[in-house]
Amino acid sequence: MGRPGVRRARADRLRADDAVQLAFDVGPLPFHIGAVLVLDRELDAAGLAAVLRDRVPPGLRRRLVRAGAGRAWRPDAAFDVARHVTERACPAPGDDRALLRVAADVHAQPLPGGRPPWRAVAVTGLTGGRGAVVLVLHHVVADGLGGLATLAALLDGDPPAA
């Protein structure tokens, strides 16, 4: 029962299979899915955040909260895409092998709690003036075809308006 006059955002109960995935997400390898996108130009964190700002789908704007004996999804009232985007320089020589080492390291880091479980990292310093984006999502927000649809929503299609 809430306080009179205070409207709460709707919470959606966590599905049983997602609760199992969270329960098994222990140990040194987080239960993440990820993607590495190589670009023909560099892109810094501010530029990546600008690209993503209007493209983040509702499912990536929710965070997990305690709800009774379980957990539920609730819209993150403090959502800010910039909190999910960082930048990292690729070590020399800046080739594909070095990029994959960066991606593996980014992918292995736990996602911060208390906010929607995903991150995007702009990787700079690749050979040939290229850049990259490493996208990491917890398995409870995207998997299989849903993960591909999320990736398309974030980084495919028409460029955002100037």
Image (cartoon, rainbow, N blue to C red):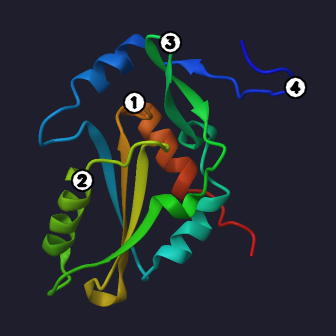
Numbered disc in front, either 2 or 3? 3
Looking at the image, the residue that sits furthest to the front is 3
Looking at numbered disc 3 in the image, what kind of residue is underneath it? Gly
- In this figure, which residue is indicated by the disc labeled 4? 5
Looking at the image, do the residues carrying marks 1 and 4 touch, with CB atoms under 8 Å apart? Answer: no
Residue 47: image tag: none
Q: Quadrant of residue 142?
A: top left
> In this rendering, is residue 103 above or below 92?
above
Looking at numbered disc 1 in the image, what kind of residue is underneath it? Val
- In this figure, which residue is indicated by the disc labeled 3? 68
- Identified at 55% across, 67% down, the residue is 49
Q: Name the N-terminal-most of marks 2 and 3.
A: 3
Looking at the image, do the residues carrying marks 3 and 4 touch, with CB atoms under 8 Å apart? Answer: no
Observer-nearest of 139 and 73 = 73
Q: Residues within 10 Å of mark 3 (few under 14, many from 20)?
A: few
Q: Quadrant of residue 77?
A: top right
Q: Quadrant of the C terminus?
A: bottom right
Looking at numbered disc 2 in the image, what kind of residue is underneath it? Gln
x and y percentages locating residue 42 in the rendered image: 42, 82
Q: Name the N-terminal-most of marks 2 and 1.
A: 2
Q: Quadrant of the N terminus?
A: top right
> Alpha carbon of mark 1 to alpha carbon of mark 3: how far?
19 Å
Residue 140: image tag: 1
> Alpha carbon of mark 2 to alpha carbon of mark 1: how far?
16 Å
Q: Name the N-terminal-most of marks 3 and 4.
A: 4
Is 152 left, or right, of 97 in this rendering? right
Residue 109: image tag: 2
x and y percentages locating residue 158 in the rendered image: 66, 61
